[in-house]
Amino acid sequence: MSLLVARERPLTSPLVYTLIVLGGALLALLLGAVLMALWGVSPLQGYRELFMGMFGSAHSISESLLKATPLIIISLGIAIAFSASAWNIGAEGQFYMGALAATACALVFSQAPGYLLWPLTLIVAMVVGGIWAALAGYLRARYGINEIIVTVMLNYIAMYFVQYMLASPLRETQARGVGYPQTDVIPQTIWLPRLAPGLRLHVGFLLAVALVFVVYMLLRHTTLGYRLRAVGYNWRAARHAGIGVSNALIWAMGLSGALAGLAGQLEVTGVHRRLLWGISPGYGFLAIVVTLLGNRHPFGIFIAAILLAALDFGAQTMQRGTGVPVALVHTIQYLMVILVVGGGVLRTHRLTLFDPLFRRREA
Amino acid sequence: MNPEIILHAGIATGTVLLFAAIGEVLAERAGILNLGVEGMMLLGAMAGFKMSLASGNPWLGVLVAVAAAGVLSLAHGLVSIHFQADQVVSGLSLTFLGTGLALVFGEGLTGKSPPLIPNLDIPLLSSIPFIGPVFFDDHSILVYFGYLLAPLTWYYIHKTRPGMHLRAVGEKPEAADTLGINVYRLRYFYTFLGGCLAGLAGVAISLSVSPGWYSAQTTSGQGWIAIGLVIFAQWNPINAALGAYLFGAVRRAILDLQGPRTLFGFTNPLFINSNWGFFLQMAPYLLTILALIIGSRAAMRRRLGAPAALGVPYIRGERGL
């Protein structure tokens, strides 16, 4: 095991990180090419189809940004939790709970005017999503229970709950026979306007862009953000400084869940106009990848979300064109993260081959 | 609702969690937190299924499953041992990577039926009343292996010299290093072993307990439950095994509750509205959270805790704590 040794060096610069990200992404694409070749498809042709699917036309750009919208918002939430060193792996469940709450609220108060109903559904979605995540924050603060496992478990619980609601109380009233698990269409008064005729991209994307700056300001220039970061850096020191560590954890998780719930509300009012099973093709999980790739920084997240969303959409075009399964692109995405994360060591460590300290000692 | 049948099936179902949890106990005892269990299990389930289908020999499937998950775990080893990256990040990426690979190569496996791992009876033991039919009758060989694995692992960790080295590496790697124990090598080894056992858990699902390939639904979060179980079990393999069987029985009881028309003389509420079954399905996940709460309280009371160096990369040549 003396082959490779990492030793700390006090050298960090943004340039190094950029190079690591680019290098990791490139290496992942190369490994993806190998996988494509194994699948029996020319990597060049595969990547051409992939790129055309990502940004090749107004339609594909619109679809890529449409997919990026929930990813940006959810990832910002995960970054908030992370600033207090808490992991929110349960965004998928919080997203579904938020979407469910928004839909239920819209269907119950369908007679209310749109300018009241839309904000109401937004608030309800954020509160429900926030509580769902804050539960894990509470258990961590109160009992010291690992929030990762709790949020994963809450995911499954939320999924079964949504399935129940779609199968019974909120089931589409006009459903014929077995039917697809979905609700009725929400009132047209709260449909979000689309940005261009013929394209599905809606104003929610602009909200996501605004949120990037809001979250940046929140974390960098507010007391709450300062407290969260203080707890994240060193909770003992934060406690001595009089910061309520438990409250900070619960707030961090709660805000994180609120953003996931918000993304769910946007997906309902902006894209599908109803809640349906499968409304999220794993946004909550992909958002973790986005957050890691974006180095947990709002601006980084913005870029990473658009890249990964475009890859996701382009993958469908590629599958139609070349028969390469969509899951292969997912593998490329995950390889990217593991390489970028693993490569992160280069920021703080110098790697040496055959280090003398690790030679077998003479007995 | 025959208790013998539920317990029998619960033991079989619990064996999956047992392998995954004991694998994680070994890795965590060496100081490596591997959150990639779900991904490794899914990869194992897919690889074993595919190999058994291709070769017609389920044992080759088991071998390939174990090897595939073991190799995948080495990626986590490299990133977290040599590169000293955040083990949470690396483990999560491993879950995604394993899931992604399993789904790519598992394309088109749904609905296929490869040869499965055979079931067998243990002579003599299977004729003991109640105990025989539950524990020693018509189980897959993996179940019997599970009976041996838990006590053997306990004995290994607590009573043998290599087991002491394992604990040292997880509790105080600097001290272990000064005694000439190769910290890096042992951490790789137990990460790999944990991966192998996760692969075994995966293939136990797809080739024995609930045969078939249902993409990500094949494991349905059991890898995460296993990680929770390790904390609940306080890093003790015997406790982990008992917890695994308990979860197995619960999982099984959920299925059996949906069948009969009457329960204990009353009309089965699931016959009035079958959608209530969704709430029943939440049980294992709720139970995991409950187990974590109970486990954390027990740990506080008895002042027990995780291995001291769990999740902390060891950097040779740096001053210890």
Image (cartoon, coloured by chain):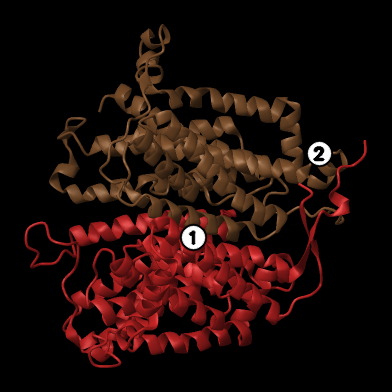
Chain colours: A red, B brown
Residue at 42 percent across and 65 percent down: it is A329
**Does residue B96 lie above or below B70 as drawn?**
below
Mark 2 neighbour density, 10 Å: few (under 14) some (14–19) many (20 or more)? some
Residue at 56 percent across and 42 percent down: it is B70
Q: Is residue A353 left or right of residue A283?
A: right
Give A321 or A21, whichever is nearer the viewer: A321
| Relative image position of residue B303 (x, y in whole percent) | 69, 43
**Does residue B216 lie above or below A253 as drawn?**
above
**What chain does badge 1 belong to?**
A
| Relative image position of residue B1 (x, y in whole percent) | 25, 28
Q: Residue A314 got which mark? A: none
Q: Is residue A349 left or right of residue A249?
A: right
Residue at 28 percent across and 61 percent down: it is A162
Q: Which residue is mark 1?
A: A34
CA–CA distance in space, label 2 to label 1: 39 Å
To which quarter of the image does residue A111 belong?
Answer: bottom left
Tally of marks: 2
Amino acid type of the residue tagged 2 in the rendering: Ile
To which quarter of the image does residue A146 belong?
Answer: bottom right
Name the residue furthest right.
Answer: A363
Whether residue B140 is visible:
yes
Q: Which residue is mark 2?
A: B181
| Relative image position of residue B13 (x, y in whole percent) | 39, 33
Question: Do the residues at discs 2 and 1 belong to one chain?
Answer: no
